[in-house]
Amino acid sequence: MKPFECLYVPFGVPTFHLESAQKAYEDSISLLKSVDETITVSNEMLLSIETLLKYIDGKNPDLVILQNVTFANSAYATEVLKRISAPVLLWTLREPVIDGGRLRLNSLTGAFSAGYAYKAMRKDKIFYIYGSPSDDSVQNRLKKIIHAAKLKHEMKNANLLMVGHTPQGFGFGRALDLEMASTFGVNLLAIESRELTKIAQEMKIEDAKNEENEIGRRMVGLENTATKNRVDFVKLYKAYQDYIDKNQIKAIASRCWPDFFTDYGTPVCSVLAMLNDQNVAAACEADAYGALSMYIGQQLSKSPTYLGDPVSIDEKENTITFWHCGTAACGLARKDTGAAVGVHPNRKIGPTMEFGLKECKEATIFRIGRKPDGTFRFLILDGRVLDKPQQFLGTSVVVEVEPKVNPLITNMVQDGWEPHFVVVYGDIKEELEILAQLFACEVVKYEGEERWKKERI
């Protein structure tokens, strides 16, 4: 796959104040290069249709940044849109001087011309920024749009592995390979869980010494697990890791119960925890879109994410507790306990992870949901992870939310959201909205007691 390419297209006309335009053009390039050195920039301002066409000829970028360095009529944007199908960010420059004298750039009027052309020629929505290269808001927004566009490009080469099938009644986690590819560009691979357990059963523990040492550095109290289960866990982890490495897997959605308890005799929970800790997004109960949500959250936050069921709310603290049997990344454990190990709360077989998650002042609750009509939507909620101990056997996290929690839960249930949600350690709300726009997915937020939706584009 070709590397990500972002193309900067600065156009205008020579009848405005070219000294001001030149400075804005040079400052814009400096900013763009500070964000991503690989961004393609022109050697000069494109002040005629002829120079514009020569510059864009043969280029096939993944993102286009159109900038009115001065006013230009809609013919300039039209020529770009005719030849390049990539998403477009339109950047309008702030007028440099307001002194009762000459209008130096008139970039804003040019933006209206470009926006008019875009609306007439495209069905999707244009990205837009207003301001000078020195504006903090411009710098932040620019970085987030480029970051999200780069992630979308990388997802075309991402493999998501389904290990087994969802249990009966858990159909919300199932995914079709063509749906996954056509909407998100991700390759959906599949393997039966018995294929991996067979590899683990035939493996000698001596062949997994590196994995055993790595597990020992990350987990607390594994020595208390029955010897057979401890050995089988290490071998199973190596079987998963080897398959992931060989097939360049970025995320997995793994079946867990009942097979790993009844057929293999050792849960897969801690295997998934180890993978999450090493930035391989790993969801349990074969939840494919849960795994994809984890992967996106992980890539945008540069931190492991947590997939959990909403199991409890506290109206006084305005919190939701998310829980699961024991698959949380070791690095998300509270410092006072570390990544403690125990047994599964129902099956009483170990090892599984047993801890409360660490606090985080800025967190995001996220889920890619599949609607009954086959389209997709992004749930995006602002949150704060509180400093709370383990709430139930397994792993748990208590998240304070902004809307009133009881009506929030009512709306989410009535709107038919899946019962798995991702808690992201970081504020990535804006990047997620950008990504939703790139994928033409609906954005759903909840504010107060009301739903807030951005229509699918």
Image (cartoon, helix red, strand yellow):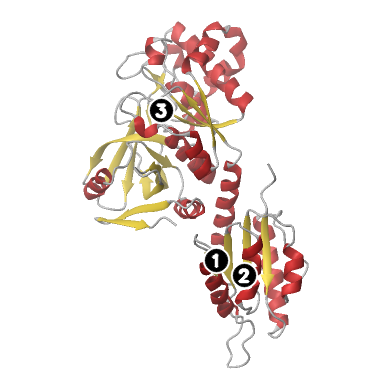
Location of residue 189 with respect to 374 vertically, above or below = above
Tag 2's secondary structure? helix
Residue situated in front as seen by the camera: 362 or 217: 362
Circle 1: residue type: Met
Question: Does the residue at mark 2 contact the one at mark 1 (Cβ under 8 Å)?
Answer: yes
Residues under labels 2 and 1: Cα distance?
A: 8 Å
Q: SS class of the residue under badge 1?
A: helix
How many C-alpha atoms fall within 10 Å of the one at disc 3: few (<14), some, or many (≥20)?
Answer: some
Q: Nearer the viewer, mark 1 or mark 3?
A: 1
Measured as percent of width and height from the top left, residue 224 is found at: 42, 12
Q: Which residue is mark 1?
A: 121
Q: Which mark is residue 78?
A: 2
Mark sitting earlier along the chain (1/3): 1
Packing grade of label 2 (10 A; few <14, some 14-19, many >=20) is some
- Please give the name of the residue rendered at 60% of the width and 13% of the height, measured from the top-left corner: 209
Q: Which residue is mark 3?
A: 337
Residue 208 image offset from top left, x and y in percent: 59, 13
Of label 2 and label 1, which has the lower sequence position?
2
Look at label 2 and name its amino acid.
Thr
Q: Where does the image place residue 397, in percent across and percent down from the top left?
A: 35, 36
Labels 3 & 2 near each other (Cβ < 8 A): no
